[in-house]
Image: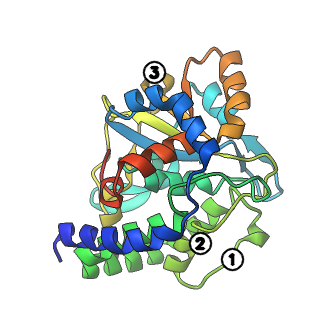
């Protein structure tokens, strides 16, 4: 099925589904207006996106790591062990995951939202965007996406997914599904049980980023690099408005001059300016 038809279908169906989303209120619009000039400037760049959060579990005993301070201490993002391609086969190697699609990276970042924290405006739920991405991939080439899902399942994809999800939520609180695809979808509804946790979206300048050759259809949305990404290659960081002050303070103390944008302001900008089709394509 032609790719433009699948995106067209998602656009039409998606607009119907998104009619029920929470509309931005005056408070969200005021936040956007405060950052409008910066956002217009920053979003003109060609960017990769990396989704993470302020805190993660680093052991089954419940030890918590401050990921933001770890990134600062490393002067940027450093590769971690994940599945990646080697000689047309998949093996574990140290990589950083990136995406040209902000809404895809946001799915991973939003898992870090403290389950007990106040809700804030997002242009559509994580589950919508994840299903839209999977739907487009499936309609484009159903046999390939099914075979690759089976392939990843046999590689231990479900266990890898549980391992990733257990970084934001204690393992005993994570649902264990029999099928990999259901475990994959679970990350669209999972929130962190770490008090004070919040999502962080890191916008990375595309210049000079050396990517590994993609192996899966999903790599239309996710790409990997083996090389560290220093702060000099970071365009800006997005966090919830409530976390702007604390994030700015930590970066300022570390003498890191990185611009910080509220997630709500960026989501309002995307809500006002872009179609679903646009947001399933590189901005």
Residue 54 position within the rendered picture, expressed as x and y whole percent measured from the top left: 68, 42
Which part of the image, by quadrant, shows the N terminus?
A: bottom left
Residue 79 horizontal side relative to residue 246, left or right: left
In the rendered structure, are the residues bearing label 1 and label 3 in contact, judged by CB atoms less than 8 Å apart? no
In the image, residue 42 lies at what x, y percent?
41, 30
Residue 78: percent from left, percent from top: 52, 36
Q: Residues within 10 Å of mark 1 (few under 14, many from 20)?
A: few
User: Which mark, by number, is residue 175?
Assistant: 1
Q: Quadrant of the C terminus?
A: top left
Determine whether label 2 and label 1 are within 8 Å by CB.
yes
In the picture, the disc for residue 186 is 2
Residue 173: name its quadrant. Answer: bottom right
* Marks 2/1: CA–CA distance: 8 Å
User: Which numbered dot is residue 232?
Assistant: 3
Is there a contact, CB below 8 Å, between mark 2 and mark 3?
no
Point 27% across, 67% down: residue:
7
């Amino acid at each position: 099925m032609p790719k433009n038809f699948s995106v067209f279908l998602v656009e039409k169906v998606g607009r119907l589904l998104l009619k029920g989303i929470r509309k931005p209120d005056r408070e969200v619009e005021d936040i956007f207006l405060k950052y409008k000039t910066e956002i217009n400037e920053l979003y003109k760049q060609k960017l990769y996106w990396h989704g993470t959060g302020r805190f993660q579990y680093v052991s089954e005993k419940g030890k918590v790591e401050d990921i933001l301070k770890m990134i600062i201490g490393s002067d940027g993002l450093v590769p971690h062990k994940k599945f990646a391609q080697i000689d047309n086969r998949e093996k574990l190697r140290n990589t950083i995951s990136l995406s040209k699609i902000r809404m895809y990276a946001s799915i991973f970042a939003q898992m870090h939202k403290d389950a007990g924290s106040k809700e804030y405006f997002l242009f559509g739920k994580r589950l919508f965007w994840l299903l839209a991405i999977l739907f487009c991939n499936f309609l484009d080439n159903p046999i390939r996406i099914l075979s690759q899902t089976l392939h990843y399942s046999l590689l231990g994809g479900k266990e890898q997914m549980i391992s990733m999800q257990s970084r934001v939520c204690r393992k005993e609180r994570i649902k264990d599904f029999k099928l990999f695809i259901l475990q994959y979808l679970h990350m669209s509804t999972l929130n962190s049980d770490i008090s004070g946790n919040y999502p962080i979206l890191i916008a990375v300048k595309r210049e000079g980023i050396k990517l590994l050759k993609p192996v899966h259809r999903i790599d239309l949305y996710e790409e990997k690099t083996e090389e560290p990404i220093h702060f000099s290659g970071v365009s800006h960081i997005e966090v919830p408005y409530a976390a702007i002050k604390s994030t700015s303070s930590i970066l300022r103390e570390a003498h890191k001059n990185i611009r910080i944008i509220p997630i709500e302001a960026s989501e309002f900008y995307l809500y006002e300016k872009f179609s679903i089709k646009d947001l399933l394509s590189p901005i």
